[in-house]
Image: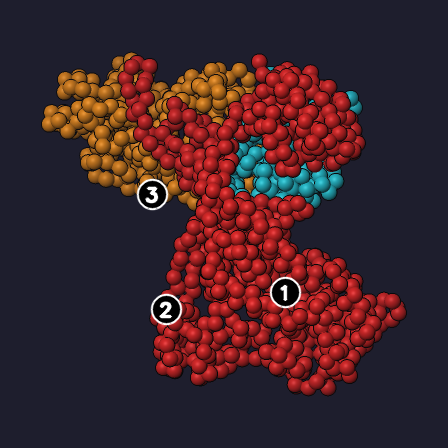
Amino acid sequence: MQVNENETFVPTIVAFCCNWCSYAGADLSGTNRLQYPSNIKIIRVPCSCRVNPMFILRAFQRGADGVILCGCHPGDCHYTTGNYYARRRMTLLFSMLDYLGIERGRTRVEWVSAAEGQKFAETMKSFAAEIAALGPNRRLEDLRCRK
Amino acid sequence: MQKIGVFVCHCGTNIAATVDVKAVAEALGREPSVAVSTDYPYMCSESGQNLIKDAIREHALDGVVICSCSPRMHENTFRKAAAQAGLNPYMVEIANIREQCSWIHKDKEEATEKAIILGRAAIAKVLLNAPLTAGESPVTKRALVIGGGIAGIQTALDIAEAGFPVDIVEKEPTIGGKMAQLDKTFPTLDCAACILTPKMVDCAQNENIRILSFSEVEAVSGFVGNFTVKIRRKARYVDETKCTGCGLCTEKCPVKKVPNEFNLGMDQRRAVYIPFAQAVPKVARIDPDWCNMLKNGKCGLCSKICTVGAIDYKQQDTILEEQYGAIVAATGYEPIKVDRYDEYAYTQSKDVITSLEFERLTNAAGPTSGTLLRPSDGRHPHTIVFIQCVGSRCTPEKGKTYCSKICCMYTAKHAMLTREKYPDTDVYVFYIDVRTPGKNFDEFYRRAAEEYGVHYIKGAVGKVAPRADGTLDVQGSDLLMNEQLHIRADLVVLAAAIEPSKTARPLATMLTASMDTNDFFTEAHPKLRPVESPTAGIFLSGACQGPKDIPETVSQASACAAKVIGLLAKDKLTGNPCVAHSDEWMCNGCSNCASVCPYGAITYEDRDFRMPDRTTKTRRVAIVNPAVCQGCGACTVACPSGAMDLYGFSNSQIMAEVDAICK
Amino acid sequence: MQEMMKKRAKTLLADGTVSRVIGWRRGEFSYDVTPAVFETAEEIDRDFVFDAFCGANVSKYLIRESAKEDGRILAFLKPCDAFSFNQLLAEHRVRRENVYLIGIPCAGKADIDRIKKAGIDGVTGIAEDGEDFVVSTVYGDERVKQADVLAERCLACKSKRHPVYDELLGEEGEDLPDDVRFAGVAKLEAMTAEERFDFWRSELSKCIRCNACRNVCPACTCENCVFDNPASGISQKAAADPFEENMYHIIRAFHVAGRCTDCGECSRVCPEHIPLHLLNRKFIKDIDELYGTYRAGEDDGTKNPLTSYTEGDAEASVVRERGRA
């Protein structure tokens, strides 16, 4: 979480993108010069199934206000089945976070193909707006990591 | 203490315009472990690469971070450069500050700050990189071409020419594809069959090519160099090895009213039939939906008349399993169905036809033996209206958003040929634009308009209404003359959009090849790698990758073959070293990992471990086969103990990246 | 039942079928029963107990015991213990050939805290009598309805059947309607997010990281637990921050998701009485609702729902449509 000079809340958002579809989709939105907020940083993973719940929790611990996982559309995974597992794990993880009272909007899964540069930019913009509206992450933050 | 080198690329002004590259280099230079940090206009250029290599040698760098364009662009370039300087190529990480930073942000301060954070994440990751060595896997020197149209044929011929065995799998009973249904081809007006059939025969006679006709791919497993494919050889109820293609059975068959697909339903064939005269293989097929013997057990005439005993009513589908090193997708296209465009009255009048139907009408082997006649009453059409862009260049709800590329040229061809053969027939073409980008294409279209007197009208057709007297009222706009027109036509031809074959999407799933939203196969790079799929070992040939005409298809088919040959010429493939590995000290042997591995790369062994109390304990542990592992990482998350980790994207590396970003 | 078990154990020891027996012995207090391994008939006579305080699940100990090469071990498994054992078997954690299983019936075990809450102190023993327990104390005997003092997990028991055994003592039981098991979870799901957050903060802040829940859990059997492994990035010895309190429990529940047999041991052993079963049951409820009813340990054929999938699985956005925000 960052607060700039004007005291407006600038969310920190981590996006995990799979190398084959969503990362390429992110590159495409860059190639097409489609804008989205700079507070979103992308971490490249080989497949959406690589994302361990540990990473998501770590992101929140270290100050992220929102975490989004992007991968290939189910059925199109470069490794055939990875995103199916990712889909199940993330659904269960997000349900557990919701159960613990963490705001639902802080996590999201979005399937973006390598041809969907537009969709990637729109998704990032809408997610950033949602997180900004939710405010800073207080319920799942580690006070020792606060800046 | 590790020594990292940071290299920030300007990429001309692509990065430098919105990111203060010098500030980034300076900020990252202050990070712990960074021994040298510099910037340069074009890192990927030879001088840029030399800069990196010199720095590696001079500072004895352990790792390198390049802040530049996407790793999907130049990761290999920089890895090679590092290797040439004596640094393990996997000690290189790339921070994407172009596609994911400079190109998407306008505020220089924000973009610079983000670039610094992304650079820090890459530094955090490279500090945890381990030097990796790529493994090797063998290559099966055999190619599979899926689709036997002109694209598949050309690709197969080129691969066979290089000396490698090729199988062509074609779902129809014969190869030839759409080109076999064409009459003449633009811009040379060659007879399609005349230029195609010699190639078809070449395929049949080439000892390196095996044609698996009336067959479909059922399952694909494996990876580049080592694919295992199951092919279903569908039953034609005729023994391919015995049938001579004499055609006697087709003459005697009593079932005569089967709609003939080759002529798009405009005439009939028999239940036992040969698709067309130049079919390859020239083998009959019995249609089980119409054959009396197969349906009711009555008849058997063809079997009695066949002189070589090729009829086999009991034939079953068989499955063939084969190994291949490379697979080519050449599944081609289909014209869309135009039934839904009520405004063109396709379903209301037999005289509203598609271009492919027109092609069959003008073809000497077609339903009217080449005479252009109205399908409704068999009379000669005196006025023909061609409507372009039916279903192309639309909004997504109306049809396809893209341009189908071939229609302007083939409509000009149809118009010109009609005018040449029937000078008394008036021909109108309603167009939005006339697109003629190829060699001699524009001259061709201008001949149609200027020499042959085809009336080109810039405007859309609003409605085609059948009239009581059997003609059609075509109402359209002429935008250049700024008026509404009504043309009384005898025949209306719709230039229907083209879309990928319906078999393409299930095939793409089997091949794990990506497709775009229109079901065209995606190429690895739209400009620089047009004939390869991002999935290693899968190549693309022809219209399945995007609408294209015959000259382009043949070019691409040969390009595709060149890529395949480049692969098959290798004896060994260098694998991807970013594979999973299991720490046997932590592994439980619980088998969660193998359950999620798509490639079957994980097996289990009982291993003995010497315990601290000097006893030996035997434990079951997971073993990953690095040659089969493709590095997806599903096992790492399924593993509860964290024993399974992924080289190149390890748990600690990803968490270091998270830390760097969230700090 | 205790006598039948002791007799059978001694017989199997004597005839060499097994070389050891795992069962229960009294601890400091009569209700403080712990699993123990017996090697001789004398030990069995002296120390082996089986009564309504024997809630402890012995399956986990069989991982180490079945790895020993000196003969088989006899284990008495209640139905819920048998589910745990079957799950361990599916994960190759136990050597089946080194274990002799006797399935024992179970009408439910008593929760000492509920007995104490009912006002009964100085407990020295317990016996079943119809629908009641007769609790012997230093002040005399007390009678109490079983339904009032049974452990919560026994009141929500899902099955009296043993999915794996070599022999049975008594009649085989049946599956139960299993319609109250998720009531606690449903109650939380019906609260607002703020209420849930407050609930879990108040519960999890009590956690002292004794790790008893992990140590007793039959699904938590990793040779080297991530929380003990400094290289994992999430190792902790104590929860130094509310975040770490949350994280330990989320990750542990996630790691056992799809493998948890809902034996309830985690809540039983927690010294702070945190209702940990509400976390594991949330995963089970979600899995049942989203991916089809699944009971870990019920058989060895079906795949763990976290290592399988269907093409029509719900999207993660379904979380936004369920329960209450």
Front one among A53 and B109: B109
Question: Given the image, what chain letter belongs to the residue carrying mark 1?
Answer: B
Q: Residues within 10 Å of mark 1 (few under 14, many from 20)?
A: some
- Residue beneath label 1, please? B336
Image quadrant in which you'd find residue B179: bottom right
Q: Position of residue A123 (x, y in %)?
A: 67, 40
What residue is disc 3 on?
Answer: C301
Mark 2: amino acid: Gln
Instruction: Classify mark 3: residues with Cα within 10 Å, few (<14), some (14-19) or many (20+).
Output: few
- Which three-letter amino acid code belongs to the residue tagged 1? Ile
Task: Tell me the red chain.
Answer: B
- Residue B27, by quadrant, is top right
The nearer-to-camera label among 1 and 3 is 1
Q: Position of residue C110 (x, y in %)?
A: 31, 26
Specify the farthest residue to the left. C15
The numbered dot on residue B315 is 2
> Considering the image in quadrants, where does the N terminus of chain A appear?
top right
Amino acid type, label 3: Gly
In this rendering, the answer to whether B533 lies above or below B499 is above
- From the viewer's perspective, tell me whether residue B161 is left or right of residue A63: left
Q: Is residue C240 visible?
A: yes
Discs 2, 3: same chain = no
Secondary structure type for disc 1: loop
Q: What colour denotes chain A?
A: cyan
Say which residue appears at 20% left-offset and 20% top-offset.
C38
Does residue B397 appear to the left or right of C20 in the view shown? Answer: right
Q: Residue at x 71, y 29 (%)?
A: B47
